[in-house]
Image (tube, rainbow, N blue to C red):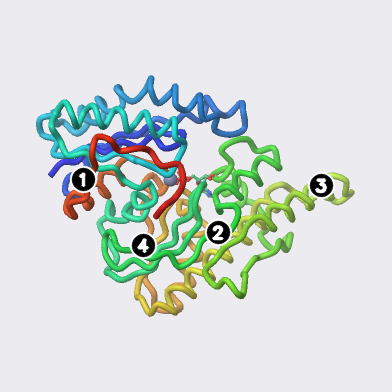
C-alpha cells in the first residue's frame, strides 16, 4: 500500500510516498530556514503562509519523483501535532481535501510517533522491546517500545529540550539560527574538556532531563569569557557544551535500557543526527552488549517519510481519522 505523507508542523514543508511503511519512493522537504533566519527563530505566521505557498508543489513533486499518480495512493497521512497550530492547519486542510476528493482514508499522525517510527525507514531495525530516545527541538524523552504503536513514556525533560539547548547556545554565541548543526560542526575542532559544564543527572528522576541549568551556565560562562584576558575559543565552548548534553543523554539511555533488560536502543529526532551523540552512544552501548539503531540524518530531522510510515501502521491498526480532525498544539502522547 502506498501512503502519501504530509508534514507541516514547524518550518519544513514535507511530502513523501512510502510503500508498506518501509520503501521510500520519494521524500521531499522544503525548508523555510532562510525566511526565519533574520528573526533568530521560527515566526509562526510566516511559517503558515510559506506552507500555504509550498504545499501544493511539494506534494506534486513527491508524486512526480515517485513516478506514481494519485490513483495509486491508498491513504493520506498527515501530522496532526504537536506543533504550531497555524502551520499544522495547512497540512491538515490539504490532506483532508485530498482524502475527501479521492475517497481515501485520512490518517492523522502524532509527530512524536512519526519520529519514533522513523527507524523503520532503515534496512536494519530493532526487535521489540527496545528503549527509544527521542531528542529534537521540541522533545527530549525516553520510551519503552513494545510494538510499532505501543510505547510507554519513561521520562522526559522538565524544561528545555536538548535541541532547544543547542539552538539557544548557538544564539548566545552569535552563531545564528538554526544553531544545532553549527554547534556540532564547530565542536569537531574544539576541546570538550576545556569547560566543565554541569550535567543534570537528577538522581530522584532517573529518566527525566533538565537542560535549563546548562543553558544558564553557558550564558554565565560566555559573559565572563568576553571580559577575560585569556579568551576561550568558541569551538571549545561548543565542544564542552555538546559533551555535557551528550553525556547526560548517553548515561540515561543506557541506564534505561539496562533497567528494562532490552537488547536494543533507538535514537530519533533532529538531535539524533549529532555525530558526537551517535559515536558516544554506540561506543558505550557496545561495552554493555547493546545494539544501537539510529536513522540516517535526513530521517532524524523533520520529514514526511516518517509520517507516511507511522500512517501505514495507524491504518493497519484501524486508526483512521474523521474529516473533523483538529490539530493539536501540545504533546498528548
Ligand atoms: O526533529 P527536528 O527536525 O524538529 C523537531 O521536531 O523539533 O529537530 C530539530 C532540532 C533543532 O533544535 C536543531 O538545532 C537540532 O534538532 N539539530 C541538531 C543537529 N541537527 C539538528 N542538534 C545537534 N546536533 C546536530 N547535528
Ligand atoms: Zn520533529
Q: Which residue is mark 4?
A: 293
Q: How many numbered dots are placed on residues in this image?
A: 4
Q: CA distance from mark 1 to mark 4?
A: 29 Å
Disc nearest the viewer among 4 and 2: 2
Mark 1 or 2 closer to N-term?
2
Name which residue lies at 74% across and 60% down.
195
Disc nearest the viewer among 1 and 4: 1
From the image, which quarter does the C terminus lie in?
Answer: bottom left
| Front residue (pair 90, 130) | 90
Q: Which residue is mark 2?
A: 157
The reply to whether the C-beta atoms of the residues labelled 1 and 2 are less than 8 Å apart is: no
Residue 22 in view here: no
Q: Which residue is mark 1?
A: 320
The reply to whether the C-beta atoms of the residues labelled 4 and 2 are less than 8 Å apart is: no
Mark 1 or 4 closer to N-term?
4
Q: CA distance from mark 3 to mark 2?
A: 26 Å
Q: CA distance from mark 4 to mark 3?
A: 39 Å
Local SS, label 4: strand
Looking at the image, residue 7 sits to the left or right of residue 138; the answer is left
Sort mark 4 into few (<14), some (14-19) or many (20+) by Cα contacts within 10 Å. Answer: some
Q: CA distance from mark 1 to mark 2?
A: 31 Å
Picture coordinates of residue 72 (x, y %)? Answer: 10, 34
Mark 1 or 3 closer to N-term?
3
Picture coordinates of residue 171 (x, y %)? Answer: 66, 40
Amino acid at each position: 500500500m502506498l501512503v502519501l505523507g504530509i508534514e507541516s508542523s514547524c518550518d519544513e514543508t514535507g511530502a513523501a510516498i512510502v510503500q508498506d511503511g518501509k520503501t521510500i519512493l520519494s521524500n521531499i522537504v522544503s525548508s523555510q530556514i532562510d525566511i526565519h533566519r533574520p528573526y533568530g527563530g521560527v515566526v509562526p505566521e510566516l511559517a503558515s503562509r510559506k506552507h500555504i505557498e509550498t504545499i501544493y508543489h511539494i506534494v506534486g513533486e513527491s508524486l512526480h519523483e515517485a513516478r506514481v499518480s494519485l490513483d495509486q495512493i491508498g491513504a493520506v497521512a498527515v501530522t496532526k501535532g504537536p506543533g504550531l497550530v497555524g502551520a499544522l492547519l495547512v497540512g491538515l486542510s490539504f490532506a483532508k481535501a485530498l482524502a475527501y476528493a479521492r475517497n481515501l482514508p485520512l490518517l492523522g499522525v502524532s509527530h512524536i510517533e512519526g519520529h519514533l517510527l522513523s527507524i523503520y525507514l532503515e534496512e536494519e531495525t530493532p526487535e521489540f522491546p527496545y528503549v527509544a530516545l527521542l531528542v529534537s527541538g521540541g522533545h527530549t524523552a525516553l520510551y519503552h517500545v513494545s510494538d510499532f504503536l505501543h510505547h510507554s513514556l519513561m521520562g522526559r525533560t522538565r524544561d528545555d529540550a536538548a535541541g532547544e539547548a543547542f539552538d539557544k547556545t548557538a544564539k548566545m554565541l552569535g552563531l545564528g539560527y538554526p544553531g544545532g548543526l553549527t554547534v556540532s560542526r564547530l565542536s569537531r575542532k574544539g576541546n570538550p574538556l576545556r569547560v566543565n559544564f554541569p550535567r543534570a543527572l537528577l538522581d530522584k528522576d532517573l529518566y527525566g532531563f533538565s537542560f535549563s541549568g546548562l543553558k544558564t551556565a553557558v550564558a554565565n560562562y560566555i559573559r565572563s569569557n568576553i571580559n577575560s584576558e585569556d579568551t576561550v575559543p568558541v569551538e571549545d565552548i561548543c565542544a564542552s557544551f555538546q559533551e555535557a548534553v551528550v553525556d547526560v543523554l548517553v548515561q540515561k539511555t543506557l541506564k534505561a535500557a539496562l533497567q528494562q533488560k532490552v537488547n536494543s536502543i533507538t535514537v530519533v529526532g533532529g538531535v539524533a543526527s549529532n555525530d558526537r551523540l551517535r559515536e558516544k552512544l554506540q561506543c558505550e552501548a557496545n561495552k554493555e552488549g547493546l545494539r544501537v539503531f539510529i536513522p540516517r540524518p535526513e530521517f532524524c530531522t523533520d520529514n514526511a517519510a516518517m509520517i507516511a510510515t507511522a500512517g501505514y501502521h495507524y491504518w493497519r491498526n484501524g486508526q483512521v481519522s474523521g474529516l473533523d480532525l483538529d490539530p493539536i498544539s501540545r504533546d498528548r502522547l
